[in-house]
Amino acid sequence: MNAVLDRIRTRIVPACLTALGVALLAGGLLSYTNPVPAGPLPPDDPDPATPVPTAIAAVPTPSPLISLPPIGSSPPESAAPSIPADRVPTRVRIAALKIDLPVVQAPSGYPYCNVAMWYADPRLGQPGEGKATYIFAHARTGMFLPMLNQSKKQNGKAMIGMVVELWTSDDQRFLYVITDVRRHVPSTSAFTAPFAAKSEQLWLQTSEGVGPMPKLQLVAEPLSQEPAPAAEANPTPHVVNCR
């Protein structure tokens, strides 16, 4: 008899209580009042008896719908800035050499004095067109003589890094930096490299003597472009036929 009572007390009663508890939990009749910590208490917690709040999982917010372009479509192309068809150089300055001259189109005959000239050829371009712009002047006082004088000192090393300013007829100011000094270029091949240029460049040229003498060329790479006052960009040229 005692064995039967022991079996009821130690096995059957606990089993019944367990089953009853499971049923009550499933029906929502029981709940825990204190949350269970997700991990151990911090070592510096002043009150270890205080329950640690359980972290609440953040509910993800639906992201707005993103409209995607059709498969295989190309992104829209940005409009390239328009260049006036009649843009031409009007002024050139190398402040470090005290050169500041109006620029005009070169004549078909002997070059002018008192100005610099831009050379017209389909293989060349105007500032901003992505080609080489070619400007030249006599190696005379008040023109490009300072270039020639400086080229005789360590092959013109001091001119590398000088800034060249070039204004255009549509009131723009272009900045270039001199990157190369080319001395003793034969007259017969002076245009070989500028004609073949594949990117924006500025070429400045003067003679190293009278007649068909070798040329001095400075090559400059573009730095920037900005609007300029019309009076600053368009000085009045005083052309002199100096032959």
Image (spheres, rainbow, N blue to C red):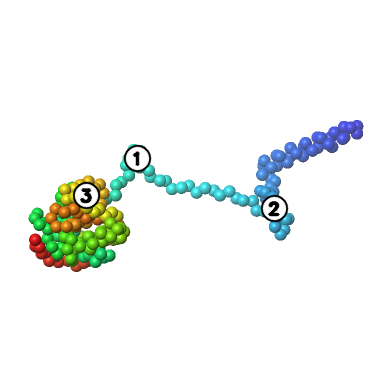
Pointer 2: what residue? 41
Q: Position of residue 12 (x, y in %)?
A: 81, 35
Mark 3: few/some/many CA within 10 Å (<14, 14-19, 20+): many
Q: Amino acid at mark 1?
A: Pro
Residue 37: give x, y in percent of width and height. 68, 50
Tell me the tag on residue 175.
none
Taking depth in this image into account, of 182 and 17 the one nearest to the observer is 182
At label 2, counting other C-alpha atoms closer than 10 Å, the crowd grade (few under 14, some 14-19, many 20 or more) is: some
Give the SS element for disc 2.
Answer: loop
Looking at the image, residue 47 lies above or below residue 67 = below
Residue at image location 69% in from the left, 45% down from the top: 29
Q: Nearer the viewer, mark 3 or mark 1?
A: 3
The label shown at residue 70 is 1
Helix or strand or loop: what does disc 1 sit on? loop
> Residues under labels 1 and 2: Cα distance?
54 Å
Instruction: Give me the disc on residue 194.
Output: 3
Residue 7 in view here: yes
Q: Amino acid at mark 2?
A: Leu
Give the answer, above or below, for where 149 lies relative to 29. below
